[in-house]
């Protein structure tokens, strides 16, 4: 539950301007996570989230150097399955997690991956060459296994 809650915090902070812990707590509640102030403070500290003064007022921000590394640690937990046909690879994720997983796959800048397209719980991964589909699937699976070992 903690890992899912922390991933939700990162997603909320990536998508919305959050100035207070109360605002973040409200957004987490809307996402299905009820947290105490102490738990939220601990999560923010563990995630390396900082509060900065921006021109439009104070806000919580993700620390870029930690963000991708920590998000990748959850990748193996977010993916439920991978299948392919002769043209594309379909990655099934937990509900609402496809966009985050697709962003991580895209951030690899792997030469075998042309790009991704994400819905709510489904990602289409387009290989650079249909001949390389098995190789792309191995890359995604190895990334999942590596991240499970790192996060566990």
Image (cartoon, rainbow, N blue to C red):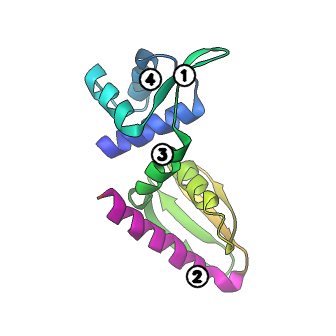
- Is residue 34 something that shows in the picture? no
Using the image, tell me which numbered label, if any, was put on residue 52. Answer: 1
Chain-order first, disc 1 or disc 4: 4
Which is more toward the observer, 95 or 99? 99
Q: In which quarter of the image is residue 132?
A: bottom right
Q: Position of residue 135 (x, y in %)?
A: 58, 82
Q: What element carries label 1?
A: strand
Q: Find disc 4 in the rendering and name its residue.
A: 24
Using the image, tell me which numbered label, if any, was put on residue 135. Answer: 2
Q: Does the magenta stretch include residue 142?
A: yes
What's the residue at 43%, 66% (across, down)? 144
Q: Quadrant of residue 109?
A: bottom right
Chain-order first, disc 2 or disc 3: 3
Q: Where is residue 50 in the image (x, y as percent from the top left)?
A: 47, 28
* Cα gap from disc 1 to disc 3, whole angstroms: 16 Å
Which contiguous range is marked in magenta? 130-151
Q: Find disc 3 in the rendering and name its residue.
A: 66
Q: Residues within 10 Å of mark 4 (few under 14, many from 20)?
A: many
- 94 left or right of 36? right
């Amino acid at each position: 539950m903690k890992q899912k809650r922390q991933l939700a915090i990162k997603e909320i902070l990536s998508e919305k301007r959050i100035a207070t812990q109360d605002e973040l707590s409200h957004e987490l509640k809307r996402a299905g996570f009820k947290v105490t102030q102490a738990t939220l403070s601990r999560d923010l500290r563990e995630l390396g989230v900082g509060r900065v003064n921006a021109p439009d007022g104070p806000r919580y921000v993700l620390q870029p150097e930690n963000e991708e590394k920590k998000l990748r640690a959850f990748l193996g937990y977010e993916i439920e399955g991978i299948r392919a046909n002769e043209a594309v690879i379909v990655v099934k994720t937990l509900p609402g997690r496809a966009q985050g997983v697709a962003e991580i796959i895209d951030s690899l800048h792997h030469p075998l991956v042309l790009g991704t397209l994400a819905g709510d719980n489904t990602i289409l991964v387009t290989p650079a060459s249909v001949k390389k589909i098995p190789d792309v699937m191995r890359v995604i699976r190895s990334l999942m296994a590596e991240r499970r070992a790192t996060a566990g």
